[in-house]
Amino acid sequence: MSDLLRHASHALRPRPLVWLSQQPPIYLPPGVSAEPGPLSLDRTPYLREPLDRLSPLDPTEIVAVCAATQLGKSTLAMLAWAGWVRTAPAPCLWVTDTDAKAEELAKYRVEPVILATPDLLALVPPGRSREKGNTTQLKAYPGGYTRWSGAQTVSGLTSMQARYAILDELDDHAAATLGDTVRLALGRTTTYGRSRKVLAVSSPSVAGQSQIDAWYRRGDRRRYLVPCPHCGHEQPLDWRDPDGGRYRLVWEPGSPETAAYLCAGCGRLIEERHKPAMLAAGRWQPTGQASDRSVTSYHLSALYAPLGWLSWAQLAAEWEQVSAGLRRGDQRDLKVYLNTRLAETWEDRGDQTDPGTLAGRGERWGDRLPSAIRLITCGVDVQEDRLEATILGIGPGWEMWVLRHAILRSDPLDDRTWGDLDRILATRWETSDGRTLGVALCAVDAGYLTSRVIDYARRRSGIMAVRGVAGAGKPIWNPRAKVTRRYSSAALRYHWVGTDAAKDWLYQVLQVAVPGPRYLHVPLDLLQQHPDWPAQVASERRVKVTQRGRQVWAWRPKPGSRQEALDCLIYAIAAAHAVLRDRPHYLSPDEPAAPVPQQAQPDPQVGKPRPAPRRPSSAGGGWLTGRGRL
Ligand SMILES: [Zn+2]
């Protein structure tokens, strides 16, 4: 009793304003927390700064925390509330999605903390003392009171003016209010002007509808930088590089317990045991200008979860489940993972491919190719400093297997670079039923270094120069060769590839989630070798654009994306269309497969495909008949 009284009399003395991270501890009783005792920020040091922004000493009005679950969001709310009650009491509104949840929060989360924390107990009498005006959802204390409420009730609380508002799991409110709870709450805080404090915490939901995401973007979008234990490089913990490149949490496939973080500075692996020290040494850094200066905003993924809460190994294991779901065409786990683990919005995808879908497709098929493959083509993209080539196997029903993606890093003006491509094109592949296949046709992009590419193609068989052309109504492959004298005295030929049609076609293919007709198989070693391959293939989205005053659909790159892998795949697909236009029976399971070019290029005669049993086809003029040939 004497203890309680001493604390109580101390608590009732006027208290100076302090930074809220420096207030006396509050106590978590067993049952409320798995870690009962004084609430320390030592394990969640990233909460210190947002908590201090909520101090009356700080000019910030709105603190938006977009965070995964299990990072201490409720701790932040609890400490902010205790700090306000202790140092600058005023009316406070604490909002959850439903009234039932608000009652539960007040009764089972807040009240036990009050009971276990002597100075708070002295200020805020327990809920059963109804004679003092306190009920479960309304608690008065000297200088103010707090009301716990569901979001749908807040709009009814027109008479209440509050200086403080806590909006708990904000994105769950939308269903109840069909509006912006933050705006509603701000409407209740106007009389307090710039001394008001609003804390909005939540995991995000669907892009474009997520309130926490919208408020996060209004602020200065702070990320928590932590130093690498090996090289000291300060970096935010990213699931994946923001440009859609490398994954940063890595593990042996099938062994999530080996998960470790790949430092962006030195490239060494960081084991999770270093995390407490890294978090303690971390600091928040804004990543942009706030469009609303009253907002300070923070982002935290589950990669930051304190040791012993949600481990990297568990995140890896969950991701393997997500991948398994994606292979079945089930995206529900992915949505949950993005929202609650990575604290990212879920995009209700218009026509665009999710790189995650492709990244989860990795499979092994051994040294020999699946017997279903009947035809192999190749697409080559020419860049200033390299060639990239994708080799594609195609089987009945347009089931496809990406066989290889090669990057030849040398100058395309150098003949040796093209010699390297020759060697790749000369590869022979064994199928598991004992056939030998080679690249039947290779399409090389002549949009850049046009004359060089066309010259290369015309000195070899089984190779066609192509140029991409965007726009509706352009076929994936145009059988009529374009002849130009623009680049040299000789007439040069190439074929147009309708890139929008090809991307539409590929997009449809990538929606097929179950192996079989039209499914695109991706080998695991390719994903390991080129971790950004899925992001590149998914680098464009279909958008409405205005062309000559008309609204049309077009594929446009996502900002900051690279797309060589997409271009290579498109050209390989165009090459397959070119072959199958004249030889559709290649994909028929009971017909002989595409013939194998007999031997290495570049001799124009030897790469020539053997004549295959011919079926009537719609029209001649394809490259195989020689008329479209260079
Ligand atoms: Zn490092």
Image: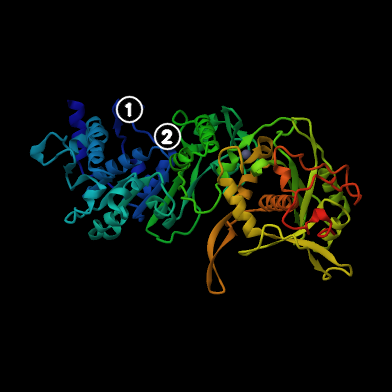
Where in the figure is residue 551, as x and y percent of width and height? 52, 68
Q: Secondary structure at mark 1?
A: strand
* Left or right relative to 581: residue 339: left
Above-or-below relation of 330 to 59: above
Most distant residue in the front direction: 616
Q: CA distance from mark 1 to mark 2?
A: 13 Å
Q: In the rendered structure, which amino acid carries the disc numbered 1?
A: Gly
The answer to whether the beta carbon of the residue marked 2 is less than 8 Å from any atom of ligand 1 is no
* Left or right relative to 120: residue 42: right
Above-or-below relation of 556 to 107: below
Q: Secondary structure at mark 2?
A: loop
Location of the C terminus (image quadrant): bottom right
The answer to whether the beta carbon of the residue marked 1 is less than 8 Å from any atom of ligand 1 is no
Image point (47%, 46%), residue name: 344
Image quarter for ligand 1 equals top right
Image point (76%, 63%), residue name: 480
- Of the pair 14 and 348, the residue shown nearer to us: 348
Q: Which residue is mark 1?
A: 37
Most distant residue in the left direction: 131
Q: Which mark is residue 512?
A: none
Where in the figure is residue 89, as x and y percent of width and height? 22, 47
Q: Is residue 392 visible?
A: no
Give the image quarter of residue 134. top left
Q: In the rendered structure, which amino acid carries the disc numbered 2?
A: Asp
Q: Which residue is mark 2?
A: 42
Where in the figure is residue 144, as x and y percent of width and height? 18, 48
Where in the figure is residue 457, as x and y percent of width and height? 84, 56
Q: Is residue 533 visible?
A: yes
- Of the pair 352 and 4, the residue shown nearer to us: 352
